[in-house]
Structure formats: C-alpha cells, structure tokens
Amino acid sequence: MSKLIVITGVSRGLGLAMTQGFAAKGHTVLGCARSVESITELRKQFDSPHAFETVDVSDEVQVQAWASRLLNEYPPPDLLINNAAIINALAPLWEVPSEDFSTLIDINIKGVANVIRHVVPAMLAKRHGIIVNLSSGWGRSTSPNVASYCASKWAIEGLTRALAQELPPGMVAIPLSPGIVHTEMLEICYGDDAANFTALKDWTVKAIPFLLNLKPEQNGQPLTVPN
C-alpha cells in the first residue's frame, strides 16, 4: 500500500537518498530543503503527486505556510521524517562562533519542533502516523570538536522520547540513528576516511524497508538502521 511521506532536508545526503528510495517503491514524497537549485532539480526528477518546496525549517513562518499548503492538498502523512540538519566546522566548543552555534541549534532542534508543531496536529486528528526524528551516534555518545552537533542530537533524543509519551495509542515517535554513512556531512568529520563507511546506496537498501516497517510497539524506542 502506498504511503504519504514528508521529509525535510531532501537536497542531499540521507534526505535525498530516502526521497529517491521511497519514490522508487511507489510511495509519495513531500519534501523541503533550503536549496532553491536542489528543489528545482527534484521537481524535474519527480512529477506529481510528489511535491518539493524551498523551506528553511528554522523559520517557523515558512514552515507554517508550507505545512498549511501540504495539508490543504494532501491528507496527513503516514510517515514524517525530520532529517534536516547541519554540522559546524570541527573545532573545540569555545572556538565555535556564537552565530554558527545558534544557526545549528535553530535548524537541528528548533527546525524539528517547528515541523512537529505544524504537521503533527493533523496527524493527531486522525490518530495515525509515525514521526521519525533523525538522531545520530553522537546523540548517544560524544567526541571532541563536535560538541554543538552532539548537543543538538542529544536534544533530539530527549525531545522525541518525551513526544512519544504524549502521543495517543497507535501513533509513534522514534529517534533514529542512521548509523555511520558516507555523506558530505561525514566528510566534514572524517575527510577522506569517510569513504570507508557505508555507501548511501547500500544504506538506502536497508533503511527504506526498515522505516516502512516501524510498528506502534516501537514508540519511544531509540533505534538504529541495521548495518
């Protein structure tokens, strides 16, 4: 059965891979990203009923307008994936500029809250749907020079597990670590060594069915995409 899936951060990396993977299996993807160029390319690649818009999730006004348009044209999503996130340049916390730190927090934490605030009420009205907030291994552990990213992903873990306790029976919220996947973001952290980790195409083969088979009894569980 075809599902309606909303994904943030679809311009590259995991978001783009999930968009392509879900669409290839016949599901409808409604996505957003900040990059105008990437959204233009996605619109060329995927026709209706898929839909893609340029949205900065850290801007609540933009998120509210986007969500309103989606919910006027489509039913509430079966699956909402909050994927949009950034990482700062590697540095000790005291060397991360205040503006860079704030931008990361605005996207990685507030962006997730903004999307939940404006999409989830429609899902609640139907008492149906799964919310997946992308976490990280660094949402459950720490490393030097990525303190701001760790802080944001630890926040996502707590936010999601609390959200899970607020949902009615049958609905699901899960903090999901994708595992270590070779993306542009990983290259920022590991440089050339990023190529030694799971390729996006291999990750997608396991991640797509894993996401499509999430169950109500997994509500609130911190999960990781299988290797």
Image (cartoon, grey):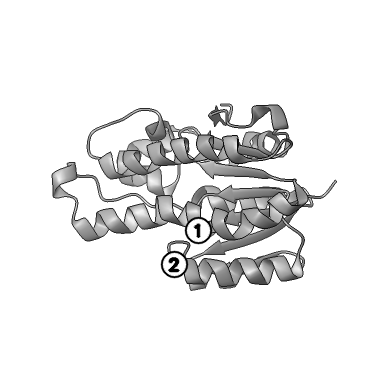
User: Residue 204: where, in percent of width, then height?
Assistant: 62, 40
Residue in the foreground of this view, choosing between 194 and 145: 145
Q: Nearer the viewer, residue 52 or 43?
A: 52
Residue lying farthest to the left in this orientation: 94
x and y percentages locating residue 179 in the rendered image: 49, 32
- Residue type at mark 1 is Asn
Where is residue 160 shown, x and y percent of the image?
52, 39
How dense is the environment of label 2, judged by Cα within 10 Å: few (below 14), some, or many (20 and up)?
Answer: some
Counting residues from the start of the chain, the first of labels 1 and 2 encountered is 2
Q: Quadrant of residue 23?
A: bottom right
Confirm or deny contact between disc 1 and disc 2 (CB under 8 A).
Answer: yes
- Position in image of residue 142 (x %, y %): 31, 30
* Residue at left offset 26%, top offset 50%: 89
Q: Is residue 167 visible?
A: yes
Q: Is residue 24 left or right of residue 37?
A: right
Relative to 140, does residue 65 appear above or below in the rendering?
A: below
Relative vertical location of residue 179 with respect to residue 71 in this rendering, above or below: above
Q: Which secondary structure, mark 2?
A: loop
In terms of secondary structure, where does tag 1 sit? helix
Which mark is drawn over residue 174? none
**Residue density around tag 1, few if under 14, some if 14–19, many if 20 or more, within 10 Å:** many
Question: Do we see residue 46 in this rendering?
Answer: no
The foreground one among 92 and 25 is: 92
Residue assigned mark 2? 59
Q: How many marks?
A: 2
The amino acid marked with disc number 2 is Asp
Rendered residue at 35%/52% (across/down): 105
Q: Quadrant of the C terminus?
A: top right
Q: Is residue 154 left or right of residue 165?
A: left
Left or right, 117 with reference to 20: left
**Residue 137 relative to residue 209: left or right:** left
Q: Which residue is mark 1?
A: 114
